[in-house]
Image: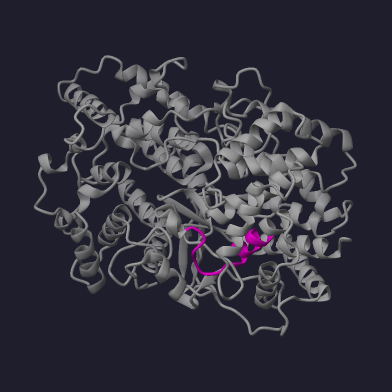
Amino acid sequence: MNRTVDENPVRASVQEMQPSTTQPKFGRIDAGLDQVDEAVEASKQHIFRMQQEDGHWVGELEADGMLEADYIFLHVLLETNDPKIRGRMQRALTEMLRYQNEDGSWSIYPGGPGNISLAVKCYFACKLMGMSAEQPLMVKARAWIRAHGGVVKCNTFTKIYLCALGQYDYDAVPAIPPEIVLAPKWFYFNIYEISSWSRAILVPLSIAYAKKPFKKIPAEKAIDELFVGGRNKASLKLRWNRDKIVSWRNFFLLLDRMVHWAERVHIRPLRAIALRKAERWMLERFEMSDGLGAIYPAMMNAIIALRVLGYSEDDPHFIRAMDEFEKLGIDEPEGTPDYEEPTFRMQPCVSPVWDTAQMVYALGEAGVSRTDPRLLKAADWMLSKEVRHKGDWSVKVRNAQPGGWYFEYNNEFYPDTDDSAQVLLALNKVDNPRERYQYDVSRRAIEWIFAMQCKNGGWASFDKNNTKMIFQHIPFADHNAMLDPPTVDITGRILEMLATYGYTRRDKRIERAIQFILKEQEPDGSWFGRWGVNYLYGTFLVLRGLEAIGMWNHEPEIQQAAEWIRSVQNSDGGWGESCHSYDDPTTRGVGVSTPSQTAWAILGLLSAGDTRSDSVAKGVRWLLERQRADGSWDESMGEGKSREAIITGTGFPRVFYLAYHTYRDVFPLLALTNYRRAMSAPD
């Protein structure tokens, strides 16, 4: 898809990314409850049609074109000649090119500015697939990349991948030595002080860095033309911070130079031990998992690590790693009505536990019977995914028993508090004949969640007290995702869950969580959203949690938040927010209206006690007018080849974003159901 990039990314988003709509069906601002009931019933039936045979739900998880570019890179590095894979690579190229902007760049979210690392990867992928540098789209891409500093401006991960194909120098990239795994757990700098996803990405990448894979490619596929001023080692190295000589950045740069010097003179006394430990660490986490960390970059790095360690293509570990990686792909050789052309696209991971928990909770809220066999089947499926083994989290939480849930089909080492809270909310909507078993599972999960509470009262996703900001200054930390700090969106969801299970403010742990949330409120009344875009997501989850736990909705903090939500409502009656608000907080709440974000706003207002305002009525009408005949909602723009999901989910702020295809349906159902209940309640 070719997109015009406006100088103001938010304005471009609002002007160009209009989702498909239907003609308004109502003349009044407020809709009758019979109309809401019809919409709720249609939505429930649509959601049930999406349920899998064994009871779970799983929707597509869409990201940007970097995944397809990396897929091409990996198979070129592996020298894959399988005709099936070669066909996928060609379709991946077609998919990747859909995302190119009119100015030649690629963006990490629709309507956003070009991203240099992504643009370089995509340009290189085009050349690896045989495209000429003189094709018009390549000329435009090259001009944009050079105008924005060229290859040297890419992040570390991109540069290391380029090194493997001879397009960058290993001596010029930040060192990721495997010796990082040798630091004892009590040491200030150890791998358990960084986020779980960075840990899973960096350990196999450190193996690759140590082994330094290299594949020579034909000269016509090289990207020397992307080096502004020519390619020389001095120009590639990271620069010192000359404005502040005494700084953590310069300290870590000095360490980095020392590591590189030791590499050159072969002073690596612990290298063999480190490689063995890194290999063992990686192989242990292949077990009970859909690949290392069950996330795309860690799985890809693990494949590279296995090969450089000498594992053959026939080795069971390598075969399994490749199989799990390929499962992330969605291959449609004949194309679909949504895409028209054949496509192969990669997902960053899959989200069945998350999607199932969201669906069951929304259906339960919508009045589906607690004994409905479809919900019971889903509940039993979720119960089968309970974590019963200690994972990386247990390094810091030593005395807690395992419990809770992960995001994917299998990821036993990495349960997270957010999924666990949502599953508990969902299970509470089902009367299970195995009542005692479900009770025991729920109690274990709640105790595990309490054990994961951070010292400031909030909850993070995968780890406890993962907040050492010093790690942000490490040279290879330029992917902006080294830490997993407590967040208000997760904390709000956990408060809602705990209230559902009978906890109140009399519990000191609950009060600490509330105080954490209140301290994090922005001056305008909103809250930052870490795992969804963005302030609309954070604010609605906080308000849901505070309402559930019994905080009076006339408190000034609550009413200020409600007023902020009303203040950012779009003229069409809906709400939307662009990923640009992560870069520029002054644009919070600004963006084209979407079904999921409109639903979040309505849910937030209802939780704040606003049931009768025009804002709520207009928001509900916006959802009703845009519901499709099959009971679903659309959260994309464009048609056919140009079709692209609007991003409302967050992977890593300012780095990687997600479009959950289930969000467009589950949250409108939840909002309409809560609206109907609020309007039916006695005054």
Residue at 16% over, 35% down: 242
User: In the displayed structure, does residue 41 sit left or right of residue 198?
Assistant: right
Quadrant position of residue 23: bottom right
408 within the magenta span: no
Residue 668: give x, y in percent of width and height.
68, 64
Q: How many marks?
A: 0
Front in this rendered view, residue 53 or 368: 368
Q: Tell me where the magenta segment starts and ends, as one range.
A: 588-602
Residue 478: give x, y in percent of width and height.
33, 41
User: In the displayed structure, does residue 374 sit left or right of residue 21?
Assistant: right
593 within the magenta span: yes
Quadrant position of residue 641: bottom left
Residue 208: give x, y in percent of width and height.
32, 34
**Position of the N terminus by quadrant:** bottom left
Front in this rendered view, residue 362 or 352: 362
**Position of the C terminus by quadrant:** bottom right
Q: Is residue 488 visible?
A: yes
Residue 25: give x, y in percent of width and height.
70, 84
Quadrant position of residue 28: bottom right
